[in-house]
Amino acid sequence: MVDVGVRRAGAGRAGRRGTVVVRRAEGRDARRLTRLVRSSRAYEGRYAAMVEGYRVGPDYIEAHQVFVAVGVDVGVKVDVEEGGGGGGRCGEQVLGFYALVVEPAELDLMFVADQAQGYGIGRLLVEHMQGEARRLGIERVRVVSHPPAEGFYRSVGARPVGTVPANPPAVMWDRPELAFLVGRHGEGE
């Protein structure tokens, strides 16, 4: 459990505080996670085809290490909560999630709700993912990044290792390949 200020970086006044918990995703989270992926502004325009029709199903959640950051009283209105029927636990707002594929080790998905960006949720998820990777004995986690997210991954310690070429028609652009060196005791070991 982590207490976070919901003030955006650089904002002049203190924000309300709330609690953000990273917990294992459950099958009943699937609809909200799918909605988060499909509604991401990072995938508008030329990137829209990448998430059109994308589904994070209960089967995917069960097969991989999927963790969700949820907030209670964080003071951030998150659109993926609208419409009800999305499952999840009472009183929680989904702020973001990640999926770690264990073999071969790869950060397959990571999304933070548009309205929750700038509050440290992405950094919290990366730190959690690194801890899970260490717990599982993984020393290196591959990331094939969405091009606009490369700067974020580098800012939280991922190192560039190459480029994954476009693969039309599914992916029409080259993507940066990065790696988190997790090691047993921390990054770079």
Image (cartoon, helix red, strand yellow):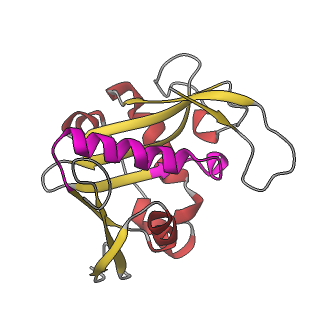
| Magenta stretch encompasses residue 39 | no
- Could you say which is closer to the camera, residue 140 or residue 42? 140
- In the displayed structure, 25 sits above or below 154; it is above
The stretch of residues the image draws in magenta is 111-139
- Could you say which is closer to the camera, residue 152 or residue 40? 152
Residue 137 pos. (x, y %)? 15, 44
Residue 102 pos. (x, y %)? 17, 48
- In the displayed structure, 150 sits above or below 165; it is above
Q: Residue furthest left?
A: 103
Give the residue drawn at x 45%, y 68%. 154
Would you say 74 lies left or right of 181 here?
right
Would you say 125 lies left or right of 116 here?
left
Q: Quarter of the image holding residue 25?
A: top left
The quarter of the rendered structure image containing the C terminus is bottom left
Is residue 111 visible to us here?
yes
- In the displayed structure, 128 sits above or below 138; it is above
Would you say 147 lies left or right of 64 here?
right
Residue 98 pos. (x, y %)? 38, 46
Q: Quarter of the image holding residue 146?
A: bottom left
| Magenta stretch encompasses residue 135 | yes
Residue 38 pos. (x, y %)? 49, 52
Q: Main secondary structure of the magenta part?
A: helix
